[in-house]
Image: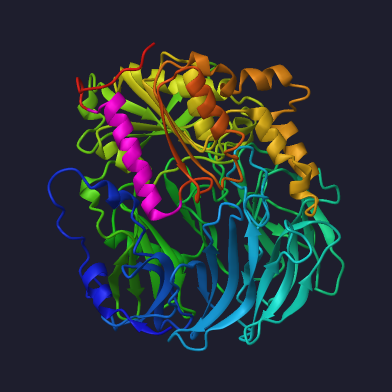
Amino acid sequence: MLFRLAAVFAASFGLAGTAGAAEPAPGVVPLGDFFRNPVFYDVQISRDGRYLSAITHTENLPTARNIVVMEVGKWNESRLVTAYQEEEIRWHDWVDGERLVFMVDRAYEDPGKSSEYVGFYSVRHDGKKGRMLHEPFRRDSRRGRGTSTSNMAGNTGGVRENLSMINDLPNDPDNILVAVNGNSLMFPDAYRMSLKNGRLESAGRANQDIERWFADHEGQVRVAVGRGEVRDDLNRTLLYRETEKDDWQTIRSFYGDDLTLHAFDGDNRHFWLSARVDRDTSALYRLDLTTGELGEPVLADPVYDVNDYGRHTRGLIVDRDGRALSYEYMADTPRQFNLDDTWNEHQQIIDGALPERFNQIVDWSDDRQRLVVKSSSDREPGRYYLLDLEAGSLRFVVAERPWIDEGRMAAMTPVSFEARDGMTIHAYLTLPPGRSDAGCAPHCGLPLIVHPHGGPYGIRDDWGYNPDVQFLASRGYAVLQVNYRGSGGYGARFEVAGYQRWGLEMQDDLTDAVEWAIERGYADPGRVAIYGASYGGYATMMGLVKTPDLYRLGINYVGVVDLVELYRQDTRRDRFRVAGYNGLVESYWKDRIGDPGIDKQRFHDTSPLNFVEQIKVPVLVVHGRLDSRVESDYQYQPLVRALKKHDKVHETLYKRHEGHGFYREQNQIELYEKIEGFLARYMPAEEGGPAQVADR
């Protein structure tokens, strides 16, 4: 398992000290540059500060993900400590100065089985003493076992991974704390796992279904969040016990997603959490576990939830001794609230050296003398640096995608507008590179792509590098990402306003966004497209049937078209019988989306499959055979049949070995080549281009 990779590091990643990517060739950025796998990500440092590690894709093993380790200061020497040929390492962590633990997935391309095999392992920094700690288990994605549905259309909270790490137990070098789904496919129990042989010892069970376990800074499991004793209840309970020998006590109950637990404070008596308590937006609190008192919010925002929403923020950052260091949340752009004076000094040094970036300290040595920094922006995917306080240096290490030149990328600008009923809607507008807001006065007249996100509830678009958006902008399109009502991050009232409003006010928000962009002069009213995935695919199809004259084309990527069939899929009894999950799914549907038995007419009227004859423009439909969230047999296939029946202009892309979104690099590139060609045929970015127009 031991390999030397010095040449690859030096040539491809600039580890010898070069901080920039190669000079870009003139002309348009190649499509593949946006969708190639990152070279490196998840850079971490060993506890003693001697080694850096990362997950990497290598040229000779392009379909695999492995761990690479290098010694700090020896920039031209590195080694792969794993050498998987097809498997992919999803996650890794240092447990001391010598050893790492990691999780491996292997996807088998068998549409009949559609399974993955997952295992949990450890290895030394030099690639020696590799050890399996938890044997691989099968996850059957067609039947929902072991898969996560956290982003599905009709978000239910999902079945969790079979094994995840709770705590690396800094004071116990021989064990770690893990959560394992042994007795339930959805709710794990807590165990101490031996790093020598993987043996499990129970560390926590409760008299109700537990979603997550939390250990104090002595390694004792003393806090948990559960679903309550009634499985079809959407409320969640916060449980606490004084010691592992004591019984669990319920401290508080919270509705739905109003609660986010973070970590024990350093005194092991208080606990950090974010919650909506007598307020619309969530705030950060320091809970007294013995009294149940929250006190005043430590951090609150009148517009935005401070939960760690978004792909680019992490919530609470806690030192290994329990000190709260900083808090990150997504507002219009990412925000940091530093809770520790020394941490704040470190942050000021970094921000001074790397201005106009979102700079995150993502890992650090136990003595906090060496810190790993990830620096990113809306135009930069991520560059990693090492801050060495003893040496007084901040040194570039690697870039996630070194071929991306941020000077050729487009700026993402937060905007807002009023919907037709007066509700404020937030969005992100990305204009093609070289175009600016000032350059649009009084009129840009750009081709516009409305790009609604999936979910829909609790999910949001956020500020940061987005390859999808950058690709479209590089081809001359303005992109508008709308956080329509129901999206997360903007308070309870905003999210609840989207409940049971699929195809209604939620869709109107997208229509109002287009009209706003036209009125402001950004968009050419004759060149507007809509493109989304999952719920965004639903919104695409609903837009084409509800406002058929608004759009020039639509791109539906793994989208829903029949709400009744989606309900049947999600509540199919044989799918969740073992997990006892069925009642929770039905409760979620009735609360957030509706009951097709009671709301039969609404479900019919807001299922775009029933109105395909109203479509006037070309449609591209993309799906994967292995999709367990939006099953192709009940969504994609009926839609394609209906498009053919009504003689509608359409194209398709269907992959037998992909699921809810294309994962393999070659398939992603093929997808966007298909999208690029489809746009060029029916809505070219250059005004007056040779567009084909569908019969109306």
Q: Residue 525: horizontal and vertical position, in percent?
A: 32, 16
Depth check: give the residue in front, 448 or 614. Answer: 614
Q: Main secondary structure of the magenta part?
A: helix
Location of residue 402 (image quadrant) = bottom left
Asked if residue 684 is among those painted magenta in the image, a careful observer would answer: yes
Q: Is residue 511 magenta?
A: no
Identity of the residue drawn at 86% across and 60% down? 207
Whether residue 127 sits left or right of residue 173 in the image: it is left
Outermost residue on the top side: it is: 696
Whether residue 125 appears in this view of the structure is yes
Image side of residue 510 versus residue 72, left or right: right
Above or below residue 4? Residue 422 is above
Spot occupied by residue 266 in the image (x, y as percentages of width and height) = 63, 70
Vertically, is 688 above or below 317? above
Q: Position of residue 159 (x, y in %)?
A: 68, 53
Quarter holding the C terminus is: top left
Q: Residues in magenta?
A: 663-685
Q: Is residue 321 visible?
A: no
Of residues 487 and 472, the one drawn nearer to the viewer in this rendering:
472
Check the picture and name the quadrant holding the N terminus: bottom left
153 left or right of 453 in image: right
Colour scheme of the picture? rainbow
289 above or below 97? above
The residue sitting at the left extreme is 26
